[in-house]
Image: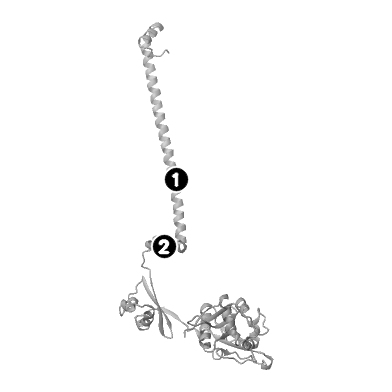
Amino acid sequence: MAIVARHATANDLPHVKDLCEVESHILEKHWGPYNIPRLLERNAFSCCAVDDRGAVVGFATLHHFPTVGDFNPSTWLQDAGATWKMADMEGLSVSNTMVLTFFFAEHVHEEEVLNEMIRMAFSICQDMHRILLFLPNTQPLFKPLLGNFDPIPLNDGIDPSNVAISAFRAARGDFLTEMSVRPAMVEDHDDLVPVFKAQKEDAESYGEFFLANMIQSEDEHNKALVAEANGRAMGLLVLTSDVELGELQDKFELETYDFLVQDYGEKATQVHEEHVERVARMRKEHGERIEQVKKDARAQVQEEFDQYLEEREQEENAEEEEDEGKTDEQIEDERRGEGGGRKKK
């Protein structure tokens, strides 16, 4: 039967209550008086496990400090370090440590439920290095916690009879295999084929050496990486920079991602500044052309006006020469004869 761990929600409360009700008296001895809705509300992390029918078969909560004992939430880690040997836990701090504050599962699935829940917690809380557990001395460590959490010894000089609580720990590496990422090699083909076939129903249609050929075709534009655990390649990631960027920009809204252009912000600023400078230059050139047109127009008008004055002056001079020696009566008679074409001076 497959067991899956997921975040617990308010909709799970009735099922969790029914699950825990049968052994509530035992749970109170382990975890002290508890209230399921309050656990879900007040703890930093809560999860439940469901079987393949969707039935809730387990429930657990983790918090940033212990709820058993008289620990001060702000100094609990220092207080615990004064009692138990915590110094050998590398990098121990409140930011990378959580405390298991409640756990219960159907006994048939309890081992699998615990492992699924702890793995889920470590997977989601990437900065968490370990989980601590504090239980009353009156209750021995019980399954499935027994075997998955190691006891933390008391500091030298601490009298066990004066300590009413026992401390335990579980490290990330005990539940999650450390994984490394490296460049892929053709030799990874045999490890990767089962992974590929499990996720691709038509894997056979790609050809027998599809993965090996993909890895072998690496160049400056195409790279392949593998995730390795326990000396085996567990996953493959192939990346390429050889894409038609313009086509993607035309079909998708990529402004949020700077249109997939590296250093887009700097380039956009540069383009904007160049645009502003170009517009200013064009406006200046346009203004200069308009002023030149105006200047040329004024010069042409002035030239035509000067020419008109010169012609007018020549006409008047010619008329004066023609009328020289004539009397006013003669000139008046000529004007009448010309129909008044000449003006009296």
Q: Amino acid at mark 1?
A: Arg
Q: Does residue 187 appear left or right of residue 61 in this picture?
A: left
User: Where is residue 144 drawn, in percent x and y?
Assistant: 55, 89
The local secondary structure at tag 2 comes to loop
**Res. 30 mark:** none
**Residue displayed at 45% across by 45% down:** 283
**Res. 283 mark:** 1
**Residue displayed at 38% across by 16% down:** 317
Tell which of 87 and 281 is nearer to you.
Answer: 87
Q: Quadrant of residue 136?
A: bottom right
| Gap between marks 1 and 2 measured at Cα | 36 Å
Q: Residues within 10 Å of mark 1 (few under 14, many from 20)?
A: few
Q: Amino acid at mark 2?
A: Phe
**As displayed, is residue 272 above or below residue 296?**
below
**Res. 252 mark:** 2
Q: Is residue 20 visible?
A: yes
Q: Quadrant of residue 185?
A: bottom left
**Residue displayed at 47% across by 61% down:** 265
**As displayed, is residue 43 above or below residue 170?**
above
Tell which of 293 and 210 is nearer to you.
Answer: 210
Q: Is residue 9 visible?
A: no
Q: Does residue 59 appear left or right of residue 325 in this picture?
A: right
N-terminal of the pair, mark 1 or mark 2, is 2
